[in-house]
Image (tube, rainbow, N blue to C red):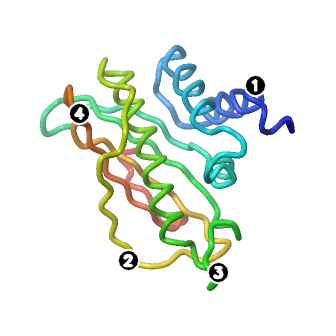
Amino acid sequence: MSSSRSPNARLARARELLKNADCNLSPEHKELVARAGAAFNRGGQFADSVMMQTRMIVCRTFERPEDGKTHTRVVFEVTVSQDMCNAHNMMHGGCAAFLVDACTSVALVVQGLVTGGALDLVSQSLDTTYHAGAKLGDALNVVCTTVSSGKRAVTAHAEVSLADLLWPSSW
C-alpha cells in the first residue's frame, strides 16, 4: 500500500486541508470533519483519484439573515485532469455529478455536526443542470451551501464554476 493511500496519510492530508482552509469550525469539529473525510475517501475505491485532487478551501458556518438559522458553506477547488474527462477532453457529466454529490455531502455533515443533526446521510436525489462544459486543465470551484436541515431530511445547493470567477464579498 503506498503512503498516499494509507489511512494515516489521508487523515494527515485532511487535517492539513482544513488547517489551510478559511474555516470557522471549532478544533473538535475540524478533527471530526478530517476523520470523516479520510474515512470517506479510501484508496482504490470509485473516483479516488478525483477526490485526491479536490481541495477544501472554505468551510464556514453562518447565520442565515432571513431566518436566523445556522447554515454551512463549503468550497472546494479542483483542476480538471485527464481521468475526469470524456473523449473530447471535457469533464464528463458523470464526474461533475459525482463531485457535486461528494462535496454537498461534506457540507451536510458539517451542518449536522454544528447543529446536532444527522451525520449518517445518503443522497436521495440529485438534480443537475449543465450550462457549460469544463475543459481539461480548467480550475473549478464547487460551492456547496446548505438549504434546509431537519430531523429526517437535509438539502444542499451546489454550483460548479471556473475558479477565477469572483466570489461574493459576504463569504
C-alpha separation, residue under disc 2 versus residue under disc 3: 17 Å
Q: Is residue 120 above or below residue 48?
A: above
C-alpha separation, residue under disc 2 versus residue under disc 1: 39 Å
Where residue 157 sits: x, y (%)?
Answer: 31, 51
Callout in the foreground (2, 3): 3
- Badge 4 marks a residue whose secondary structure is strand
Tag 3 residue: 89
Looking at the picture, tell me which residue is in the foreground, 171 or 40.
40
Q: Amino acid at mark 2?
A: His
Do callouts 2 and 4 mark residues in contact (Cβ within 8 Å)?
Answer: no
Could you say which disc has been placed on residue 131 in the image?
2
Q: Earlier in the sequence, mark 2 or mark 3?
A: 3
Q: Is residue 52 left or right of residue 65?
A: right
Where residue 26 sits: x, y (%)?
Answer: 48, 17
C-alpha separation, residue under disc 1 versus residue under disc 4: 32 Å
Q: Amino acid at mark 4?
A: Ser
The N terminus lies in quadrant: top right
Q: Is residue 85 above or below residue 21?
A: below
Count residues near mark 4 (Cα–Cα under 10 Å), then give few for <14, some for 14-19, many for 20+. Answer: some
Do callouts 2 and 1 mark residues in contact (Cβ within 8 Å)?
Answer: no
- Badge 3 marks a residue whose secondary structure is loop
The C terminus lies in quadrant: top left
User: What residue is drawn where x is 44% and y is 42%?
Assistant: 74
Do callouts 2 and 3 mark residues in contact (Cβ within 8 Å)?
Answer: no
C-alpha separation, residue under disc 2 versus residue under disc 4: 28 Å
Tag 1 residue: 8
Q: Is residue 149 above or below residue 44?
A: above
Could you say which disc has been placed on residue 149 in the image?
4
- Give the image quarter of residue 31: top right
